[in-house]
Image (tube, rainbow, N blue to C red):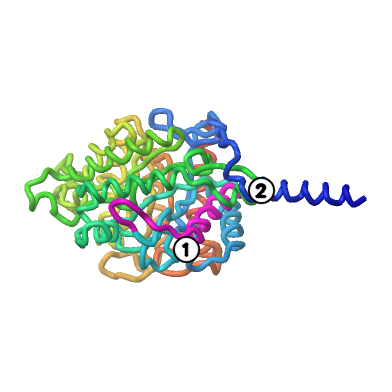
Amino acid sequence: MQWLLRLLVLSWCLGFANFAFGAKRAAFVPDRSEFVTRDGNQFTLNGMPFYFQGTNFYRLSLIERHAEAEVYDIMRDLASSGMKVVRIWGFSCGDSNAQAMLKSVSKTSAIYDEIALRRLDLAIDAARSANLKVIIPLVNYQKEYCPMSWWVNQITGEEDPNLFYSDPDVREAFKRHIGRMLSRANTTYLNKRGENITYANDPTIMAIELANEPHTDDRYESDRGIASGELLYNWLGFMSDFIRSVDPNHLIASGEEGYKSKPHSKAQVDRHWWLSDGSKGADYERNLTLPNIDFATVHAYPTHWMISTEDIDWFSEEFLADRARIAHKLKKPVVLEEIGISDIENPYLGYTKEPHKWLEVLLNAANAANYNGTMIWQLVPAGSEEGEFIYDFRSPTAAVVFKQAEHMNNKSTKN
């Protein structure tokens, strides 16, 4: 009996060792049909056209507010409401509001926080368990959580975020960071299912997004004699080519808002000219010609952009429809990736306290322009988040989003 007991203990120890050192398992080979892909200007999934309504919910991947169990509950609730895609932050750095995934970086090295990275792992697993896809941006132009300016300051000591695109040391450091992230094995998968799946091989991820809202300071290029959009175009080409070389599976997007370098008509000059005159340092159409940028992204915030209800028809045609025409002309899908209408009353703009009414108008315009995906900022289960542009399931705005989800899901079925 003693020898049998020793054999059982030895077997248990070997089993534990195999689990503990699961990272040494053979690499996971993904099923290509499970990835969202594109066929010309359409997304496809499992061999069928894929249209979707989704939401941004960036905190789900951050150690900041939600407990681990909540992340799973929220993902399930979003899926039950008809959402198909959730956009979560793939970044938090330095003195971020959340526990930072990346603590510091230099020309030659980077220091990561494994606990913070494991929350991103968990959020991806929560999406998988709810049968959702995720879009993951890798850095932020805006100042929150992990801005381009942080990267520039860490490596050069400067504060200018525009150097993120052009400084060779910053570019190489960010390229190394992308490589590390895509080669990362999801620890939640390994611990829960014993599967060694890297980010690059994970079909739960719909797209790797190079940045959230990349552009430059206003007129940064023109003040220096540089063609509008040149810095971002070159950076997007460099980084998207690198991602494709190490990740053949995923769609790649720029994360742009939709700013153009020049207007196509007098109508785009007469009103809200800054959306189309190149002053933002982004050339939407040219960027979409890059071979490894797979789809277009558009963001829309009429209340923050001071676009009144009197200009909604103009905005629908000269911004939303115009950007869709450009994308489809270039045989690429287009996603209205962020849209939000503030519920804070502004009598000068005319929205009063009816954001749901005007959101429906703009979503109908996106549908008429054949957008392949629409995403709210942000739809949340009741009690999980609050703030401007955040709509919980009980709100009139949520009802509009649910209706849009039904429309997009039916469109996938019919095509």
Q: Could you say which is closer to the camera, residue 344 or residue 354?
A: 344
For this view, does 390 lie left or right of residue 9? left
For this view, does 156 lie left or right of residue 316? left
Observer able to see residue 397: no
Query: Which residue type carries mark 2?
Result: Phe
Q: Is residue 360 magenta?
A: no
- Position of residue 66 relative to residue 327, above or below, is below
Instruction: Name the residue: 58% across, 42% down.
Output: 24
The quarter of the picture where residue 352 lies is bottom left
The dominant secondary structure in magenta is helix
- On the image, the x and y values in percent for residue 9 come to 80, 51
Q: Is residue 117 magenta?
A: yes
- Position of residue 331 relative to residue 390, above or below, is above
For this view, does 219 lie left or right of residue 147? left
Q: CA distance from mark 1 to mark 2?
A: 42 Å
- Position of residue 288 relative to residue 72, above or below, is above
* Mark number displayed over residue 228: none
Which residue, given by chain and number where applicable, does mark 2 sit on? Answer: 19
The quarter of the picture where residue 67 lies is bottom right
The crowding category of the residue bearing disc 2, from other C-alpha atoms within 10 Å (few below 14, some 14 to 19, many at least 20), is some
Query: Which residue type carries mark 1?
Result: Tyr
Which residue, given by chain and number where applicable, does mark 1 sit on? Answer: 391
Q: Which residue appears farthest toward the front when viewing the image?
A: 3
Instruction: Name the residue: 55% across, 42% down.
Output: 197
- On the image, the x and y values in percent for residue 176 come to 35, 46
- On the image, the x and y values in percent for residue 77 come to 59, 56
Q: Which residue appears farthest toward the right when viewing the image?
A: 1
Q: Could you say which is closer to the camera, residue 7 or residue 330?
A: 7
Q: Could you say which is closer to the camera, residue 12 or residue 227?
A: 12
Q: Which residues are magenta?
A: 105-130
